[in-house]
Image (cartoon, rainbow, N blue to C red):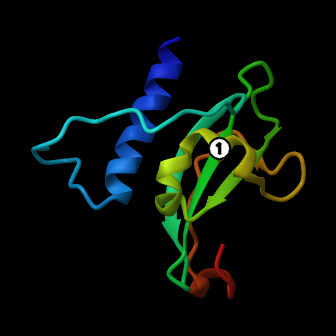
């Protein structure tokens, strides 16, 4: 239950960030629940802007019963434009790569085009 509330707080802060609020300073508004969706074993959430200006939210998973094995990574295109339908994110997220795409620890990191010759 604690993990659920932590994920909800992260999504609320993420939503405020996407809306352009400075979450590190004083807020004149109170956070509100925009919606919720289920994703088993969700681990880390990160939003990156691609070279074309499009934002992608990446969600990694982690199954504590099987550490040091592959876990799935999911993404959602343009999460900031979908804040009115957060409850539908579960059906809109796409799985990146195959069934298992990241080893633990699987914090998402963006690599610039200059590192590998393509954005990753």
The residue shown at (50%, 35%) is 35
Q: Up-down: is 12 above or below 117?
A: above
Where's the C terminus, which quadrant? Answer: bottom right
Question: On the picture, is 69 further left or further right than 50?
Answer: right
**Residue 22: percent from left, percent from top:** 20, 54
The image position of residue 11, as x and y in percent, is 45, 40
User: Residue farthest to the top?
Assistant: 1
Q: Residue 84: give x, y in percent of width and height.
A: 48, 50
User: What's the residue at 64%, 79% (across, down)?
Assistant: 119
**Image-based side of 63 in relation to 56, left or right:** right
The outermost residue toward the right is 98
Q: Residue at x 35, y 43 (%)?
A: 13
Left or right placement of residue 53 versus residue 105 in this view: left
Which residue is disc 1 drawn over?
88
Of 49 and 64, which appears nearest the observer? Answer: 49
Q: Position of residue 88 (x, y in %)?
A: 65, 43
| Quadrant hosting residue 97 | bottom right
Front residue (pair 36, 11)? 36
The part of the image, by quadrant, that contains residue 115 is bottom right
| Label 1 residue SS | helix
Q: Total number of numbered labels?
A: 1
Q: Residues within 10 Å of mark 1 (few under 14, many from 20)?
A: some
In the image, is residue 9 above or below residue 76?
Answer: above
Please tell me which residue lies in front, 19 or 24. 19
């Amino acid at each position: 239950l604690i993990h659920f509330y932590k994920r909800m707080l992260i999504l609320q802060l993420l939503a405020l960030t996407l809306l352009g609020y400075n979450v590190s300073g004083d807020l004149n508004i109170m956070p509100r629940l925009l919606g919720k969706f289920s994703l088993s074993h969700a681990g880390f959430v990160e939003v990156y802007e691609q070279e074309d200006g499009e934002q992608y939210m990446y969600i990694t998973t982690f199954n504590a019963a099987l550490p040091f094995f592959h876990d799935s990574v999911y993404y959602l295109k343009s999460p900031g434009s979908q804040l009115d339908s957060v409850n539908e994110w579960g059906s809109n997220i796409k799985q990146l790569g195959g069934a298992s795409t990241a080893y633990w620890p699987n914090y998402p990191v963006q690599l610039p085009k200059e590192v590998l010759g393509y954005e990753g």
